[in-house]
Image (spheres, grey):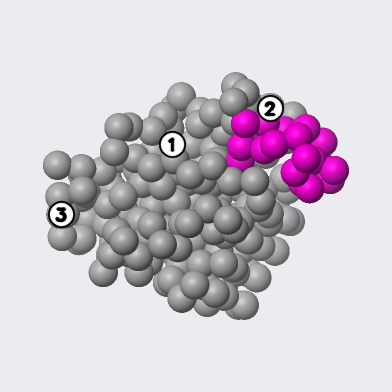
Amino acid sequence: MGYAILVIDMLEEFVYGRLKSPQAEKIVPRIKLIIEEARRRGIPIIYLADAHLPMDAELKIWGPHALKGTKEAKVINDLKPQEKDIIIEKRWYSGFRGTGLDVLLRDLNVDTVIVTGIHTHICVLHTVADAFYYRFNVIVVKDAVAAFSDEDHKYALKYMEQVFGAKLLTSDEVLKVLSKTEVSSYYA
């Protein structure tokens, strides 16, 4: 079994748009380093990306955002997916809800997800909750996730650690873990 990197909602909407996190741009270099090391090691990169339809429930709360097919629903250029990377569109906070992510991870022989992205207290938190329910080990990269506020960020990290048993590691710690991982042929 092995790792997969989850890159949650690093989209135009949440990095540069109306629903951006003030910290979003600061986490991009950290995520980029993790992605690059993962590719060298043959660890799958899975982008979970909001792609809303006009009737989605979230739009009643947040207003129109990251609508399917729009520029706002695209992964930012600095983290642009490569050919073998996987993009899963989602219509809910969790990357697992209605997407088949759990089956994909099992098909890839993944038992541990390394979580990065936006927003710590919303989509990251709900994805981590479902990863726990599906019995995956979870590592949240605490300096590669961000929220609307520092308070929301800290609350969600503590909650994921205490309630779902997520390991909270820095990007440097994750890079050390990945560097010790046997190279697979996923990106060969």
Measure the alpha-carbon separation of dots 1 and 3.
23 Å
Circle 3 residue: 183
The amino acid beneath tag 2 is Gly
Nearer to the camera, 13 or 91: 91
Judged left or right of residue 175, residue 127 is right
Query: Element under label 1?
Result: helix
Q: Quadrant of residue 72?
A: top right
Query: How many numbered tags mark residues here?
Result: 3
**Residue visible at 62% across and 31% down in the picture:** 68
Q: Secondary structure at mark 3?
A: loop
- Closer to us: mark 1 or mark 3? 3
Label 2: how many Cα within 10 Å (few below 14, some 14–19, many 20+): few
Determine whether, in the image, residue 21 is placed left or right of residue 140. right
Image coords of residue 141 (percent x, y): 47, 56
Nearer the N terminus, badge 3 or badge 2?
2
Q: Earlier in the sequence, mark 1 or mark 3?
A: 1
Provide the residue span drawn in magenta.
Answer: 50-68
CA distance for labels 3 and 2: 37 Å
Q: Position of residue 22 (x, y in %)?
A: 68, 37
Name the residue rendered at 36%, 46% in the picture.
45
Write the residue at 49% across / 72% down. Answer: 134
Q: Nearer the viewer, residue 140 or 169?
A: 140
Q: Check the image and report above or below for 131 versus 179.
A: below
Q: Which residue is mark 1?
A: 29
Q: Which residue is mark 2?
A: 17
Q: Main secondary structure of the magenta part?
A: loop
Q: Is residue 175 magenta?
A: no
